[in-house]
Image: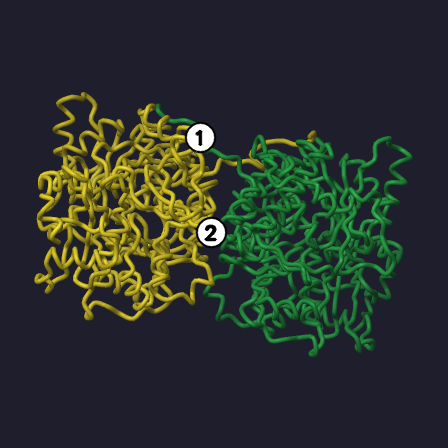
Chain colours: A yellow, B green
Amino acid sequence: MEGLVHCSANYVPLSPISFLERAAVVYGDSLSLIYGDVRYTWRETLVRCTKLASALTQMGISYGDVVAALIPNIPAMYELHFAVPMAGAVLCAFNTRHNSTMLSLLLKHSKAKVIFVDYHFLEVVSGALDILSKSSSSLPQIVLVLDEQSMPVGNVTPPSENFEYENLLATGKPEFEIRRPRDECDPIALNYTSGTTSSPKGVVYSHRGAYLNSLATILTNEMATRPVYLWTLPMFHCNGWCFTWGIAAQGGINICIRNVITRDIFRNIVEHKVTHLSGAPTVLNMIINSSNDEKKPLPNKVIVVTGGAPPPPQVLFKMEELGFMVIHGYGLTETYGPATVCLWKPEWDTLPPNERAKIKARQGVLHIGLEEVDVKDPATMKAVPADAKTMGEVMLRGNTIMNGYLRNQKATEEAFKDGWFHSGDLGVKHPDGYIELKDRSKDIIISGGENISTIEVESVIYSHPAVLEAAVVGRPDDYWGETPCAFIKLKDGHDNVTAADIIRFCRDRLPHYMAPRSVVFEDLPKTSTGKTQKFVLREKAKALGSLSHKKNSKL
Amino acid sequence: MEGLVHCSANYVPLSPISFLERAAVVYGDSLSLIYGDVRYTWRETLVRCTKLASALTQMGISYGDVVAALIPNIPAMYELHFAVPMAGAVLCAFNTRHNSTMLSLLLKHSKAKVIFVDYHFLEVVSGALDILSKSSSSLPQIVLVLDEQSMPVGNVTPPSENFEYENLLATGKPEFEIRRPRDECDPIALNYTSGTTSSPKGVVYSHRGAYLNSLATILTNEMATRPVYLWTLPMFHCNGWCFTWGIAAQGGINICIRNVITRDIFRNIVEHKVTHLSGAPTVLNMIINSSNDEKKPLPNKVIVVTGGAPPPPQVLFKMEELGFMVIHGYGLTETYGPATVCLWKPEWDTLPPNERAKIKARQGVLHIGLEEVDVKDPATMKAVPADAKTMGEVMLRGNTIMNGYLRNQKATEEAFKDGWFHSGDLGVKHPDGYIELKDRSKDIIISGGENISTIEVESVIYSHPAVLEAAVVGRPDDYWGETPCAFIKLKDGHDNVTAADIIRFCRDRLPHYMAPRSVVFEDLPKTSTGKTQKFVLREKAKALGSLSHKKNSKL
């Protein structure tokens, strides 16, 4: 078609940077962030981020460089989400639970040129640099983030005054010309997959993907203009499921908290009229198990977005009793956080509570940023029938899927085989198109040739009134191959519950072969994002050895 | 960065087609459209649109071909918004008020290969083809849309049974492979600018722009999941400000109505629990001036999105009294409909009503799909000071600006001079960044060297209790150059109001030079979208000749 052009008037590479620039115009005088006594407006946040971006470029940071961060949910972590891309660079926010060894590996792999460190984690980073210095000649520059709201007893001295966060920011120029991505598919963030596997991969997000996923997140979670978002989800976790950028898009207020403590949750909700918060089911667990003294009546509707694992029915019921509205989503680091949502249908309102809870635990349907999600046979790439029974691998495609794994072409190609992202999660599709996870491919238990979904077994165990947390893994078995083994943490004051009680409880509610044959009571090993580390439990179950079958048959 | 790839797993050209495909999965059993007794679900709408796209390709329609439509807000018009792009083609929805002459010009310019025609407009189209046949050898194929809900007395016979809408649709294959844009900047729609100028230009929209503007529209107008949208805005007008595609994105219900009649508005709002409707201020006028018999209490919050002209204060007050929440936006055909919105600030709630109305009449700030809006001196391209006084031209840039004017490279280049879209509207910028229109460049009156904003004068006239509608244009004047001339339509029963009354009323409220010197009482000429045709009024004012200055000075 003649007469058309492609120019700066009608084409701008998509980037979350636009959200901040717009927020400074549209919501300029409104609060962008509250952290204890610290308060910024959107206009101030844009100025601070611009100065920080300017300061980064003065340090030599340029297009494509990686800038790392080891910081909890305090203002600096939020500002880096904009300032680093505005310098043309790539933000790599590390899990604050990493130790020096892990950190040294990730710093080496990411080739980070700078690392911003909260004073609490300085020792970990120093340790990592010590290790790194043995194999590498160029070490990342440290910028120390001091936090006046929560300073330690002793004084912390930054490596040099110039490399203290506020000092560095002060050297930046407010008139700095923000660096836009040259192509909207350019990287904006690098997120190492955490937790359930022991070999982390560097997942690369693009400006385009981050922009689109932010809008999808807003829409999926019914986030109207000016939301008030409480940061109970770590920002280092998939960039806070893109809520970091999304809150700017809607001109909301970020309520930052250093540590996720029950009392702080309720206090902040009431004080700031929080509209949204998110987190793994552990956060929901914390909320419902808080003392009556800590609990407070909610001042308005509070939406809680959860993912990472389906919320157990009892947890859902109690959240609803407290007045929270829970939205359950599903996704992976590779999908910028939640990619599907169990979108509620009005006709489900009238179902009995147990039915509702069962439905809400489904992973649901794709959000608007994604193109397709399906459950497929990975061998044939054919979709499984939507019969709620046939298992297959959950696969996804669309603009909110990662660019790939950094410096790991092989893993990238495997993940994108046949033009779909292979999640490694096993699930079924319901007749209405809603997907439901049954297990991670590697978590599924195969017992006497039958697939056992550990999620289904866990869901039954969770309905036992004495159970606080549970995880089921396969225990090697000479006869069956594997049998289910449950690791359980009991609620306080329920120490009298026995393994036999739990097994009987499960047998009353599940096919015989699915009920655990062994039960271990102990605290569950977790990642910082609240995911149970099943590979640790599998090792423990392995160490238990095979069960004697005579003994089992008596149970 | 190594290891990354660009493939169908992580890149899909943005297109509103994705909204429909997703709606059929996510909202499959929910209603997509209601028109009298006609009801479709989203699953059915996808099947119908797929079959129609298939049928179009069977007619020979291919990538880039233009498919025209002359249809009111009935289901066929909605379906064509998806079916045409799904065949790879470009939808050109014509204003249903065009006559045969105008239509023949536009058909020729657009090179449309097919035209879908509502039976009501068959005669106009036949007339247009008669004219066209004199200068062109290839005429567009006609597809007749019969509407059982509203058939004329006599039978209408389609040119051939195959070219009746439902018959044609029936020939399509539901398994047709939907044609995706090869590039997301490929055209999706062609919209001829209507109304205020006499030489229409073909504005080209892209899949990308339509996708992004749809999301922006949803977010700007606080459209949560499953909205109920009443079609009081013509779908041919900027593709219904992208609500056509946006409603699919949110799984809403489209309530179609053939004619916009007050009684139908209230009846539909109550019956279907409408959440949103939109239209020019004339629609608001209709609503507030409806009889008590027609008015009904609203069943829920109803958001009314208005644009095209600022809603006069009295209209706003009355809408609010009736319980409507009015959102005022501003845009042009070139910006896919509204591009800015007078986003309400909480601190304005407590202002006196007149202040609030004055603020709400501002054009406001950019929506999230746009990159920048500013008021600039077109000579220097410098932004005017944000002093609410200095006038400049409103300019915009971003992904929701047209690709250009079809086969009019010169006009495209002029519009995009210096990398910004030049709107041709004159305005000021308030200290808080909100823009306010003062006039179209060509509407502004220059009287004795002073700029007079016709919008400001009209706004005062509208506050007169006897005035239903008003428009002010320049009348040639030997001494002053121009003086303001008001055209006014009075409310029923107010015929006793005189020109002198109006002039006195304005002089009490405006600087002397801004008050009209002449007043004409008559019905205002309008475009079908409710815009006053000022070029017609200017001709009338010209015909009045210059005023005698002696006579004037007495007033």
Marks 2 and 1: in contact by CB < 8 Å? no
Above or below, A385 against A508 in this view is: above
Q: Position of residue A413 (x, y in %)?
A: 37, 26
Coordinates of residue B142 in the picture (x, y in percent): 80, 42
Please indicate whether residue A49 sits to the left or right of residue A535 in the image: right
Q: Is residue A43 left or right of residue B68?
A: left
Please give the label number shown on residue A322.
none
- Foreground: disc 1 or disc 2: 2
Q: CA distance from mark 1 to mark 2?
A: 25 Å
Instruction: Report which quarter residue A477 is drawn in.
Output: top left
- Assign a secondary structure to mark 1: helix
Residue occupying image coordinates x 55% and y 35%: A11
The residue beneath circle 2 is A432
Residue lying at 22% horizontally and 27% vertically, measured from the top left: A108
- Where is residue A129 drawn, in percent x and y? 15, 30
Chain at tag 1 = A
> Front-most of A122 and B434?
A122
Q: Specify whether B312 is left or right of A246.
A: right
Image quarter where the C terminus of chain A lies is bottom left
What amino acid type should be assigned to the residue bearing mark 1? Gly
Q: What residue did someone put label 1 on?
A: A419
Residue A166 vertical position relative to residue A150 in the rendered view, above or below: above
**Circles 1 and 2 on the same subunit:** yes
Q: Nearer the viewer, residue B190 or A245?
A: B190
Whether residue B372 is visible: no
Which amino acid, by three-letter code, is at mark 2?
A: Asp
Q: Position of residue A18 (x, y in %)?
A: 45, 42
Q: Residue at x 29, y 60 (%)?
A: A313
Q: Is residue A94 left or right of residue A218?
A: left
